[in-house]
Amino acid sequence: MVNLSVNLSGVVLKNPVIPASGTFGFGYEFAEWYDLNELGSISCKGTTREARFGNPTPRIAECERGMLNAVGLQNPGVDAVIAQELPHLRQVYQGPVIGNVSGFSLEEYAQTCEKMNDHVDILEVNISCPNVHAGGMSFGTEPKSAAEVTKAVKAVTTKPVYMKLTPNVTDITAIARACAEAGADGISLINTLLGMRIDSRRRRPVLANITGGFSGPAIFPVAVRMVWQVYEAVKLPIIGMGGVSTAADVVELMLAGATAVQVGAANLIDPCACKNIIDSLPGELEALGVKDINELIGGAHHG
């Protein structure tokens, strides 16, 4: 038997596979496909203080080995998530729940996380959002602002706080260190890369928003590199993500330093992507002579 269980800041997952926020709804939507309790955890759809319709359409563009999205954090708002979405999820899933939170000011991050505190097991704080009080610059592109969000959230919650980092920075380690020094319990990375497509016939951008987040298998090497760098930079557990689509990808990202791994765009191609990865993991580990998946965490750093 192979042990697949991992520990995220005291929260035990039966395996390290987690559907990534924004690619799995609030989870219950996938219950018709398989038993969600097979999952290690679920990172729910990004939640903001107020309901958001999101960006105008078109919001999605296909790319080679990936996709662009500019959905714009569409969600019903934190009060509706707590009253309706999370109870609906709990009817079909009893495992750990990760609440993914976004905001456009320190106050919004804090208020949303405070409300979510009693309803989730881990808070994943997306700092790729623009700071409306700093000219629209993303909170996650500057160490000082990343630290400020971390401190604001830690002050109002008792749950582990994982800061979700944008890869659209010069030095990912500077952002990770700032979050760690401000009290973060863990780091999630990477969020989507910034990209765009142009319709040559219309001579216009494909997305109404012009740019969008690039995800899918094409970004996996970037994710591996950044997880490796952050593992070297901070002594915090890491949830790795970015282009994961196979059990072998999970192994590779854990060897780079991840304790758990999120699966994103693959869920949009195959609703059973996470289940298939979980089913394949024992065989993948046995082929490597690994009896406990925790042996993999950061293993490539030690030879």
Image (spheres, rainbow, N blue to C red):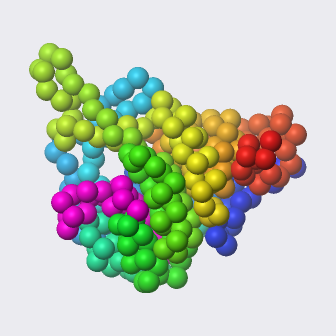
User: Was residue 129 drawn as part of the magenta stretch in this picture?
Assistant: yes
Residue 42 x %, y %: 53, 58
Residue 123 x %, y %: 48, 69
Question: Does 156 sit above or below residue 62?
Answer: below
Of 53 and 232, the residue lying toward us: 232
Left or right of 206 in this view: 33: right
Question: Does 202 sit above or below residue 79?
Answer: above
Question: Does 255 sit above or below residue 54?
Answer: above
Of 122 and 126, the residue lying toward us: 126
Residue 72 x %, y %: 26, 51
Q: Residue at x 30, y 66 (%)?
A: 103
The answer to which image quadrant residue 278 occupies is top right
Q: Residue at x 22, y 53 (%)?
A: 54
The answer to which image quadrant residue 115 occupies is bottom left
Q: Residue at x 42, y 30 (%)?
A: 66
Residue 225, can we see it? yes
Magenta stretch, main secondary structure, is loop
Residue 105 x %, y %: 26, 70
Q: Residue at x 51, y 54 (%)?
A: 173
Of 47 and 255, the residue lying toward us: 255
Q: Which residues are magenta?
A: 119-143
Q: How many marks?
A: 0
User: Was residue 30 drawn as part of the magenta stretch in this picture?
Assistant: no
Left or right of 267 in this view: 105: left
Question: Does 254 sit above or below residue 79?
Answer: above
Can you name the residue that lies furthest to the top here? 201
Classify the position of the C terminus by image quarter.
top right
Left or right of 139 in this view: 19: right
Residue 35, can we see it? no
